[in-house]
Amino acid sequence: MSAPILKSETWVLPKCNMIIDVRSPSEFINDHIPGAVNLPVLSDTERAEIGTLYKQESSFIARKKGAALIARNIANHLDKTMYKMESNLIPLIYCWRGGQRSRAFAQICSEIGWKSYILNGGYKTYRRSVIEGLKNIPDNLKLIIIAGRTGSAKTDVLCALSKKGAQVLDLENLASHRGSLLGRIKNKEQPSQRFFESKLHSQLSKFDPSLNIYVESESSRIGDVQIPGDMWKKIIAAPMISITTPSDERAAYLLRGYKNLTNDLSELNNFIAGMTYRHGKVRAAIWENFIQDKSWKPLVEDLLRSHYDPAYDKSILRRDRKVLTEISQKNCSKLCVEATTNKILSLHKMNNKTD
């Protein structure tokens, strides 16, 4: 019994209820189909070993050794991860090119009785589909940018919109980063550029293009990952809803959200040191004194006034976006965020009535 080949353009068939990536762990970490489970038939070390045998000994010896390793690893996965899987499991299995690694796994799964599929062309074909998909984003995509100076609780607004059923593209969540220079999330690694693109492509494919898609105002780079060029063009051309919040309330909000920076000063000190070339030694010394005195709110207020707000205002002026409406928030409390969210949704309803 052999596993059928699943054509590349239909790899997301809903009848496949498990996606298995049999590549090595390092290949999987670099990028994979979102939702896939890594059950490698060769570890990174084993893969390197087989490559060495192929070059230094012969292809026959390499294949024989590889087969033994693959058989043992598949048996281990069947004994552990897949032991309690029911008979209705329908796995889609892929490797780098849809070759030996995925065929070996799929063959055994099929012999067990699971209806198994192999992704034609493997990861390489999947990767091409992501690249093409991000290059050919529909022109009718209804992006609306949620804009506002740093600390305006834009992410909270996006979250509230999502909970109310609106379509939200949360780029910071996809990038595992808060977007600012101090936005690295403690104990959480950012995805590789490729996996970020995979997650973005996956999210875009789930949207209804006839409905609004709300996106937070971002720069083209979020931490270590870059928003793909064609997507970025769509973002900077989209209209925006601007949220305004008093600077002292924004400072208070940021202090609540970035408590880790005041507990461990290393990242904050590095940030101030790196900002010296841009704002000069005098301004940097003021910030250093705030840190030394643990005057956190004056520090954040001055950073907003001297760095973040001017940078944001310059960016907004450069984009020259159409402003759909401006919403004023007294603060960033849950009550105010809820009110902002309702105003955004009511604006959408009003537009629908006038269409």
Image: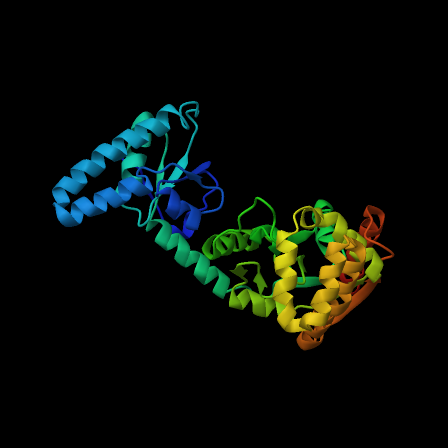
Say above or below: 88 vs 336.
Answer: above
Q: Tell me which residue sits at (47%, 52%) in the image.
A: 195
The answer to whether residue 31 is seen in the rendering is no
Locate residue 137 relative to residue 257 in the image: left or right. Answer: left
Locate residue 91 relative to residue 258 in the image: left or right. Answer: left
The picture places residue 252, in percent across and down from the top left corner, at 80, 53
The answer to whether residue 251 is seen in the rendering is yes
- Which quarter of the rendered picture does the C terminus lie within? bottom right
Q: Tell me which residue sits at (69%, 62%) in the image.
A: 144
Numbered marks: total: 0
Say above or below: 303 vs 4.
Answer: below
Say above or below: 200 vs 77.
Answer: below
Locate residue 224 relative to residue 4 in the image: left or right. Answer: right
Identify the image's colour scheme: rainbow, by chain, secondary structure or one colour: rainbow
Q: Tell me which residue sits at (67%, 47%) in the image.
A: 260
Q: Tell me which residue sits at (70%, 66%) in the image.
A: 284
- Which quarter of the rendered picture does the N terminus lie within? top left
The picture places residue 50, in percent across and down from the top left corner, at 22, 43
Locate residue 307 relative to residue 273 in the image: left or right. Answer: right
Q: In the image shown, does 229 or 188 lie closer to the viewer?
A: 188
Q: In the image shown, does 170 or 205 lie closer to the viewer?
A: 170
The picture places residue 309, in percent across and down from the top left corner, at 74, 68
Which image quadrant is residue 94 in?
top left
Q: Residue furthest right?
A: 330
Which image quadrant is residue 140 in?
bottom right
Q: In the image shown, does 73 or 96 lie closer to the viewer?
A: 73
The picture places residue 281, in percent across and down from the top left corner, at 68, 71
